[in-house]
Image (cartoon, rainbow, N blue to C red):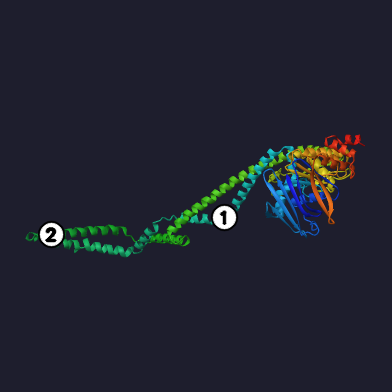
Amino acid sequence: MISRLYIKNLAVVRELEVTFQAGLNIISGETGSGKSMLIEALSLLLGGRVSSEIVRTGEKAAVVEGELSDGTDTWLVRRVIRVGGASRIFLNDEPVKLATLEERIAPLVDLHGQHEHQSLLRVATHLEFLDAYAGLSDARRRLADTYRRLIEVRDEYQQLEADLHRERDQYQLHKFQLKELQESEIAPDEEEALTREHRLLSQAGELSALLRLLQERLQLADSSITGELGGLQKQLQLFAPLAPELGELSARMSSLNLELADLAYELQRFGDTVKVNPARLAEVDERLGVMEGIKRKYGGSLAAALDHQAQLLNQISAYSAGDERLARLKGELLELQGAYAQQCRELSRSRGAARDRLAGDIVRSLAALDMPKARFEVRTENIAQEGGLCVLDGQAYKSDQRGYDQVEFYLSPNPGEDLRPLARIASGGEVSRIMLGIKTVLSAFDPVGTLIFDEIDSGISGSTAETVGTALERLAEERQVICITHLPQIASRGDHHIIMSKSVENGRTVSRSQAITGEGRRREVARLLSGAEITAASLEQARLLLAGRRSEEVLAGHG
């Protein structure tokens, strides 16, 4: 809803402020009084183009300011236009770009006439109107939920697929490395043991000879150390009675001889294990060579190689889990694509069933507005698109959260004219009347809170004007309507009335606005009936119109 409009130095308007109310706001006034500047100002607030000649002659800048509300938030919009056409835009006193007005403010208002701020002239809204008319909000909501989930799963699938593809070469290398490490069967302490064994095997011949010599000298030879030491100990034992110390020394010699005998036995036993074994030496050499190769490739030590093996296991496990996740996502993606395509098909069928009904209602509404030969058509198209998410009978289509139907309204307002896209209608007055006819049918489904009709009474009169007034009155029951008119049948239907006037001051035309009620309003309706000269008859006719009498009855009784 627009609650306030302030204009300064805009063409013939020096300065004025207009307050609008809920319901039907009528704007009237003589030609050149500035009515068109109100519409121009409102268009500027909605993001309209700026003319370089719009600033009042002799002034440096024009200012247009409006207060609008969407029922929840209130917006203060201000545009400052300088000579030459440059402008600055402020939203709630913060500088913004033109796109911000188009995004936040333009959807609050439809301006019908020779202006671009009309939702019905934006093809993207046609599907929304058709679906609202057909009562498809629940089906749309379900489709949107399916579409969102489909996009999420598709994006996750594509990202994971790309990641796995990028990692595939690395994965193959990791598999090769793990296979090599696992087949090497390295153990943490194996290298140390093999190194000892290698030293022993490489010197087995010399060691075996030494062990045999030691065993021979200690015990086996005729003049072995143990034999000679045993004989000497026996001789010393003969003198043991002579002194206690000799007994102790003899005992120590006996002990030493036993230790040497045990040493000889251990040397013999160890010597039995020492074998000259070239084949085993070659095996140990080869195994140590394998370990050296592993160490060179995987960190410089067997401990580092074992750590790398553990990391490889984790990485390969993660890749395998990714493969499994990819397979699950593919299954879910196929399931969602099937559900999405089916919902698109069902929604399209519902639209097909509703579009002729909508067209018929609009044709009847236009006929009531003195367009009896108008034709209206709701056209749907399905556009094939490679890679489209909606696949039906093997064909992929362009689609989104609204389905795969492309919807556009077509109109032929007059006999003999081809049906043309609604967005290409030319005449301002005709556009306003057409939009009124369509809005009358779609009013219950239209989210726009303010409708502005400019030139709606162009080329009509009598009963048609009466019908237009009735249609505007009904529209204003649920939303704010602002209408510029010169017809008394329409002006008399307003809830609020603003009159525009002009005067010449110091050689300059000045526009003014005034909210009128009561007698002032009766006189303005009388002026619209009879022209500049207001008569007693026109005043009486105005009274009857304002009282709700139909214009045919009023004019017939006072002809």
Say whether residue 415 is left or right of residue 61: right
Give the SS element for disc 2.
helix
Query: What amino acid type should be assigned to the residue bearing mark 1?
Result: Glu
Q: Is residue 362 visible?
A: no
Expressed as whole percent of the image width and height from the top left, the position of residue 489 reads 85, 39
Quarter of the image holding residue 62? bottom right
Residue 181, label in figure: none
Query: Which residue is label 1 attached to?
Result: 167
Expressed as whole percent of the image width and height from the top left, the position of residue 345 reads 71, 40
Q: Residues within 10 Å of mark 1 (few under 14, many from 20)?
A: few
Label count reads: 2
Q: Is residue 316 visible?
A: yes
Whether 146 is drawn above or below 223: the answer is above
Q: Residues within 10 Å of mark 2 (few under 14, many from 20)?
A: few
Mark 2–mark 1 CB contact (< 8 Å):
no
Direction left: furthest residue: 242
Direction right: furthest residue: 559
Quarter of the image holding residue 443? top right
Query: What amino acid type should be assigned to the residue bearing mark 2?
Result: Glu
Residue 248, label in figure: 2
Viewer-side residue, 92 vs 199: 92
Q: How far is mark 2 from mark 1, CA to CA?
A: 82 Å
Q: Quadrant of the C terminus?
A: top right
Give the SS element for disc 1.
helix
Say whether residue 167 is left or right of residue 193: right
Residue shown at 83% from the left, 43% from the top: 433
Quarter of the image holding residue 486? top right
